Amino acid sequence: MSTVARVVALSLLALGMFIYPQEVLSSASGGLTLWWRFVLPALLPFFILSELLMASGFVHFLGILLEAFMRPFFRLPGKAAFVVAMGFTSGFPMGAVLTAQLRQAGEISREEGERLLAFTNNPSPGFMFGAVASGMLGQPTLGIILSSSVYLANIMVGFLFRFYRVTPGSQDPKHLPSLKRAWQEMKKAQTRDNRTLGEILGAAIRQSTTTVLMVAGFMAFFAVILRLLNIWHITLILAILSHNVIRVVQVPVFQAFFNGLFEMTLGCQETIQALPLLHQQVALLTLIMGWGGLSVFAQVAGLISGTDLRFSSFVIARALQAIFALVLSQLFLLFAKIPTASFSPLQIPSTTALWLNTWHLSSLVFIGIMALLAVLALIRQTLQ
């Protein structure tokens, strides 16, 4: 964006905020409410946990054990397996946070960082099962289809990105997984970091709190922007223009789509209202969740700004994942015994219940992914 365009855009934004103060207040409040109910319980505990695990050398421990799987399948070092698991577990923008940390520490190359960034950012399982499937659709079992579509699409993107900027140094591992070498590597990492436990814990909480508050700021700010775009009928105009080109799709559907391009949660809410049939709702929901929204894009751009990672790979990956997730969801619905009519939404769980459900789901996902990666690495080495 040129300097003139940036000044004009910011001036219009400031003008809109002065003209519509009540709408700005309500939309910012709504964004912060979504952050408090859905994002904070999914992110903060795992932000702190990831900081502690990285400081303890656990990432280096995994690097030795999982090199045999990560290198041939994704052209990534074994350390990247931790980022993959945490990205699936905690949702946006955990993958970007950890990828940036590994790159800043010199643990991965620039190309490896861009490959890793491409497929380690997803909606959290708590959001897909709790907020969307249970709260918006009123059918908790649909969370299986939603999460399977989004996560499998993510793995497909990760495999495709193994061909991204391949360098001669990208080779298969030469050593079998070894618990002894993994333990030695972890002890070396602990020796290099001579901070006390109190210092490590304090730094982890401080860094995690800063990051999660930054996410809150992005969500509130983009909620205001999206509200102003709707007040000025920008998304409606885009929807009408798109309807004139593709008349099969109705204007409310296009409007939900464009809102979802900006902010994922609002796009998911409007999708339920705009589409009458369940398979149509699931299609657009998975498309929007695979994409993530410009709010997430801004978060990722801010988190990697201190590195040399290129943002373009992330954008391409999000577009691919959105398309793959939509197609997979429709294939899964062909075999799922679910009525095609929509359901009446249930009451969204309380914050306490949601926090507990999110923690249980995220913990199971993390343990499951780490166990699966370890088993696959051992199987591959056994077959060699």
Image (cartoon, rainbow, N blue to C red):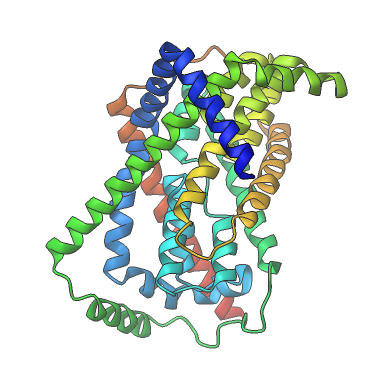
Residue 29 coordinates in the image, percent (x, y)? 37, 21
Q: Nearer the viewer, residue 220 or 372?
A: 220
173 lies left or right of 82? right
Between 83 and 360, the residue placed more toward the observer is 83
Can you see residue 277? no
Vertical placement of 14 versus 172: above or below? above
Residue in view at x 69 percent, y 67 percent? 164
- The x and y percentages for residue 333 are 69, 32
Q: Residue at x 35, y 28 (%)?
A: 37
Tell me where residue 224 appears, x and y as whole percent: 48, 24
Q: Nearer the viewer, residue 74 or 224?
A: 224
Q: Is 378 positioned to the left or the right of 250 in the image?
A: left
Q: Above or below — where is 184 with respect to 124?
A: below
Horizontal arrangement in the rendering, residue 322 relative to residue 43 (left or right): right
Residue occupying image coordinates x 45% and y 17%: 18
| Quadrant location of the C terminus in the rendered image | bottom right
